[in-house]
Amino acid sequence: MQLTPEHEQIRDTLKRYIAEHINPHVDEWEAAQMFPAHEVFKGLGDLGLLGLTKPVEYGGMGLDYSYSMLMAETMGLVNCGAIPMAVGVQTDMCTPALARFGSDELRREFLAPAIAGDQVGCIGVSEPGAGSDVAGIKSRARRDGDDYVISGQKMWITNSLQADWMCMLVNTGEGPMHKNKSLIIVPMRDGPSGKLTKGIEVAQKIRKIGMHASDTGLIYFDEVRVPARNLIGQEGQGFIYQMQQFQEERLWAAANAITGLDVAIRETIEYARQRRMFGATLLEQQWVQFKLVELQTEVEALRALTWSAGERYIAGEDVLQWASMAKLKAGRLTREVADTCLQFWGGMGFTWDNRVSRLYRDGRLGSIGGGADEVMMGIIAKTMGMAKRAGA
């Protein structure tokens, strides 16, 4: 894809914000296992970076999806995976369906503040017994007059300990699993008080092996009342809306992986250039050179695949297969690059405070979150005509 001066301007703006307002604090936030989402998001919102593809009437810039992919790729310059993931949840995971199908009133109440950085959103799909199996969720919303009353659990929810609202997938009917679900905006906090909405309980802050600066919660919902007008689009269409959101989430995940892989390889080259062993530097070993060449070639292949998928998406094509392939490749390549580079760092690679070991920890989520590798392969097999689609 040919980048325009407008693309470059947005990239430069984001690079400055990362260098001045994020990276100087990453180690502190990683140690605290939390970053100040409202503060960081407000800074990004003031720069117009949280609504690049969102409608202008709600504070967005109305640009095509190439700008979102550019932002995802540039966020790879952050010295950890947690903060880019949290930002991606705000821009490309909990807001696409709201922006596309939400009522004007709903978008003004929740989308506009999210674009401005005044509110933090999260996406509530996964549950203790239903992660990649989205159709298997158990949370329910029953209609009671002008309200929905919601009960259930959501787990692995990024941003949920700080979120002002959740875009929540729930069962709203008894029909087929792919036609009985809806997306509903659930306020997580009770206005200015900042207290959790009645009936919502943060049951656990989940400790993870990586992505430390990102808060991740297990959330309980016990008879939580939400106005029926908080329904996104039509009742019963939530599964379809979420599958569409997943396409953007997976494109975002693939694009976000690229720069981090570039950085890991580059820093490994510099370290290997200095590391001496058996009378020569590690980088002088041809097998080391060749392995790093292979990895960089794979990164460029991922870049081409991801941007090709993005071009197709911008052109209005269904990119279910392409987005799934890009996400699958990104997760697996991240594991390979992180593991290989860490090996070249030797004992230093096994220490806590370097970029490669952090990629090794953070990047492992890429083959799990947003649909595990096996789910991606199942989707691709269906699009290739080798497996039956749901309902077939």
Image (spheres, rainbow, N blue to C red):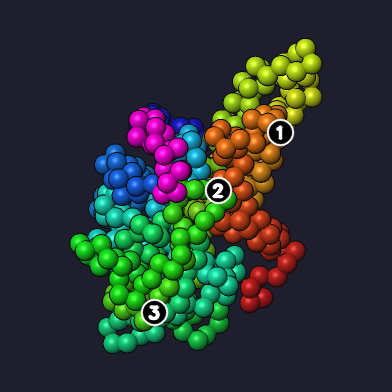
User: Label 3 sits on what residue type?
Assistant: Asp
Depth check, front residue: 124 or 23? 23
Q: Earlier in the sequence, mark 1 or mark 3?
A: 3
Residue 261 in the magenta stretch? The answer is: no
Q: Position of residue 188 (x, y in %)?
A: 33, 66
The residue at the point 74 percent across, 29 percent down is 291
Residues in magenta, as a range: 16-34
The residue at the point 57 percent across, 66 percent down is 131
Q: Which mark is residue 222?
A: 3
The residue at the point 39 percent across, 79 percent down is 222
Assign a secondary structure to mark 2.
loop
User: Label 2 sits on what residue type?
Assistant: Gly
User: Label 1 sits on what residue type?
Assistant: Gln
The majority secondary structure of the magenta stretch comes to: helix
Depth check, front residue: 122 or 234? 122
The residue at the point 35 percent across, 30 percent down is 20
Q: Is 232 left or right of 277, judged from the image as shown?
A: left
Q: Which residue is mark 2?
A: 210
Depth check, front residue: 117 or 12? 117
Q: Which mark is residue 343?
A: 1
Q: CA distance from mark 1 to mark 2?
A: 18 Å
Q: Earlier in the sequence, mark 2 or mark 3?
A: 2
Q: Which mark is residue 157?
A: none
Residue 32 in the magenta stretch? The answer is: yes
Q: CA distance from mark 2 to mark 3?
A: 30 Å
Q: Is 307 left or right of 338, judged from the image as shown?
A: left
Do the residues bearing badges 1 and 3 touch, measured as CB atoms within 8 Å? no
Q: Is residue 114 above or below residue 174?
A: above
Q: CA distance from mark 1 to mark 3?
A: 48 Å
Quadrant assignment for the C terminus: bottom right
Q: Is residue 261 above or below residue 277?
A: below
Q: Earlier in the sequence, mark 1 or mark 2?
A: 2
